[in-house]
Amino acid sequence: MISLPLDRIKTPSFVVDKALLRKNLAILDQVRQRTGVKILLAQKAFSMYAVYPMLAEILDGTCASSPDEARLGREEFGKEVTAFAAAYSAGDLAELLQTCDRVIFNSFSQWERFREMTSAAENVKFGLRCNPEHSEGTVEIYDPCAPKSRLGIRVCDFKGKSTEGISGLHVHNLCEQNADAFARTLTAFEEKFGFLIPQMQWINFGGGHHITRPDYDIDLLCNTLNGFRQRWGTPEIFLEPGEAIALNTGFLVASVLDIVHNGVDIAILDTSAEAHMPDVLEMPYRPFIIHSGEAGEKAHTYRLAGHSCLAGDVIGEYSFDQKLEVGDKLVFTDMAHYSMVKTNTFNGLRLPSIALFDSATGEYQMLRNFTYEDFKSRLS
Ligand SMILES: Cc1ncc(COP(=O)(O)O)c(C=O)c1O
């Protein structure tokens, strides 16, 4: 178990462990070495740019969902920058053409509308996102192939369209999935889009590959990617995972502010599901807390809740060996990805600080404390 320097951590704080990140990078590098694929960081999941130089030692670049993410990738990470969004405004596209190596379009109507701009951008490569109409996800909001999805072009919509100027394709339909889901997706993709693959210089197989999870089948991923390359000879293949890069590398440390009673013991924390870990409510899921059990499993059970006004700002029910006291610190695990990037200042709640820790050396570094100015500067 990682031992964070809790006495030095001001709460609430996100703390990312560099040693754990290095562990993930070593796994991802293995995939790169065995397959020759390029791996991009999906910044939507993890934009902690303080560690970009470390990630850039192994990874091949970043992918962005907006001009601001693209600029962050260009300025702080370097290497390749790829952008994809469901639609671009002319202004956004003009910015992306200045910062990106590749820009992926989500529809023929956008690709055709901006043809003059893209033709003039000689150093940028262009791709189209395909919808393989093959669902692997069970949760509709995380399934880009769900019926009526706006994401990706279906094969029927390629009929009569020119792909002149297009050098790559993009497919993304996974979310926290193992390599078997990717292998099935690839079969569907090849069946539908095989007629286009030979003319492509690059294919980007998106994110959602949970590569650094302990039970992930890396052999199957590598065999699947190598098989694809042998069948089609596509020169460049990309993966753009977000979650797999930062999986299990970060913590959110919070303190107990008060304990109240209403049928159950309720501990109110100086963090909030609504403002600091919105996926807990949105996905929804129950984050793990170090030294805790399920409700009733250990001697003392509490409902843990945030300090916002939202009645539903509840993290879940947890049990502990000891009674909780005001001032006790709790450590939520796996809080690096889709957390810092999703926080908000609802209720004017102060954003959690951001810190770096290295469990290999014990080094602890506070990177960022947020202030009133951060709250005010988002409003007018
Ligand atoms: C197009 C695209 N690429 C990559 C990702 C990153 O996915 P993950 O963080 O699950 O690996 C997403 C996530 O939504 C995505 O939509």
Image (tube, rainbow, N blue to C red):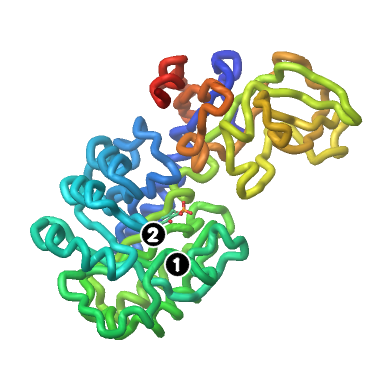
In the image, is residue 164 above or below residue 366? below
Q: Position of residue 15 (x, y in %)?
A: 51, 28
| Corner quadrant of residue 46 | top left
Residue type, mark 2 in image: Val
The extreme right residue here reads 263
Q: Position of residue 111 (x, y in %)?
A: 24, 66
Q: Position of residue 242 (x, y in %)?
A: 43, 49
| Corner quadrant of residue 325 | top right
Residue type, mark 1 in image: Leu
In the picture, the disc for residue 31 is 2
Q: CA distance from mark 2 to mark 1?
A: 8 Å
Q: Say which residue appears at 60% left-offset and 19% top-offset.
A: 6
The residue where tag 1 is placed is 221
Determine whether the residue tagged by mark 2 lies in a helix, strand or loop: helix
Quadrant (top left/top right/bottom left/bottom right) for the C terminus: top left
In the picture, the disc for residue 48 is none
Give left or right: position of 314 versus 141: right
Q: Say which residue appears at 66% left-offset and 40% top-offset.
A: 287
Q: Are marks 2 and 1 in contact (CB under 8 Å)?
A: yes
Q: Position of residue 155 (x, y in %)?
A: 37, 80
Give neighbour class at mark 1: few <14, some 14-19, many 20+ (Cα, 10 Å): many
Q: Quadrant of ligand 1?
A: bottom left
Query: Can residue 99 be spotted in the picture?
Result: yes
Quadrant (top left/top right/bottom left/bottom right) for the N terminus: top right
Query: Can residue 57 be spotted in the picture?
Result: no
Q: Upstream in the sequence, badge 2 or badge 1?
A: 2
